[in-house]
Image (tube, rainbow, N blue to C red):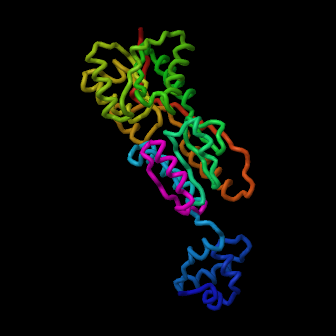
Amino acid sequence: MVTIQDVAKAAGVSPMTVSHVINDHPYVRETTRDKVQQAIDELGYRVNIAARNLRTGRTSTIGLAIPEIDRPYYAQLAARIVAAAGRRGLRVAIEQTGATKENELSTLATSRNRLYDGLILATVGLGFADRELLNVDFPVVILGERIFDGPVDHISMPNVSGSAAAVEHLIERGARRILMLQGNELSELGMPPLRLDGYRAAHERAGLPVDEALLIPVPAFTMQAAREAVVAAVANGLTFDGVFCITDSMGVGVLRGLASCGLRVPEDVKVIGFDNIDEAEFTVPSLSSIAPDHDEMAETAVSLLVQRIEQAKRPAPREVEAGFRLIERESSAGRVER
């Protein structure tokens, strides 16, 4: 195995200088850096990661636990976190929790054993009553909607304000009977009730009553469940001229369901989703959506975690809510004249 001493001898510098080049020390002359890099390339030197980890007590790897890898929202958020970590020289190991409290707790319990320097946990199952379970002895940042005032840093979505903006947008475009696809058995957990709060707030500000019949429960936040729910609503004679979907995946299903019922979007029904997944731009018609600042969320999550990793003294927990934009596309374009 080629050693730092071998590289130093070939480059005519000290082993410490080679170490500075490997670790990208800023105070190395470019000519020296070039000589060392040439020696590294010629000799085929590779950093001994295991030895460095033993020396520093770190692995340069963070964990990311998300509910479902195959959901567009979580997949795209994970990609942003991987990119943000990569800019800091960190690798990311991704785990799937299946959106269950048991698996989220298991991930917390085993993260140190898996040699992560810290963990970003997108939690769905853990709630406010479980916040003391987050008192662990390694760095953790939570992405979620139910754990406020906990012992770790917490980044949340703009659920209430974003949902209110979505519904207000439909009202401004002339919609008066706005269907909302919401949770069923999950309705008391996490995101759904917060987005329902935003739906109600928008109606109240507009002076419109909420018809409870327009709040349709679905068993899962999927395209198929949303399509089936909106088709059933039409078949049951429910009248509506707008649909607010609490996720874009559900919005895609609604567009398909309305088309199969012979209803035109946006002429007959205006539709808006939430999350601004990449696919929203490519549906026919393209799907309007609330776009949380996912880049901000990823950067903030990684930045807070790195601070936790590098600071010996634990700072006070921080709460951060992401910003958002409303993206108007074809599914809600144009005002209905009454």
Q: Is residue 285 left or right of residue 161?
A: left
Q: Residue at x 49, y 58 (%)?
A: 93
Residue 323 shown left or right of residue 208 in the figure: right
Along the line of sight, which residue is nearer the eye, 125 or 178?
125
Q: Position of residue 290 (x, y in %)?
A: 50, 32
Residue at the image point whose x is 42% and y is 17% from the top:
178
Q: Is residue 108 magenta?
A: yes
Which residue sits at x=58%, y=66%?
59
Query: In the picture shown, does residue 180 fall above or below 283?
Result: above
Question: Does residue 83 belong to the magenta stretch?
Answer: no
Residue 252 against residue 332 in the figure, above or below: below
**Quarter-wise, where is residue 112 in the image?**
bottom right
Q: Is residue 176 left or right of residue 233?
A: right
- Looking at the picture, tell me which residue is in the foreground, 319 or 89: 319
Asked whether 300 or 217 is in front, the reply is 217
Location of residue 141 with respect to 250 vertically, above or below: below
Specify the segment rendered in magenta.
Answer: 88-115
Image spot of residue 316 (x, y percent): 73, 45
Question: Residue 184 location, x and y as percent?
Answer: 40, 27
Q: Is residue 332 left or right of residue 228?
A: right
What quarter of the picture does the C terminus occupy?
Answer: top left
Q: Residue at x 42, y 26 (%)?
A: 182
Q: Nearer the viewer, residue 239 or 197?
A: 197
Please determine whether, in this image, residue 44 is positioned above or below residue 154.
below
Q: Percent position (x, y) of residue 202? A: 53, 18
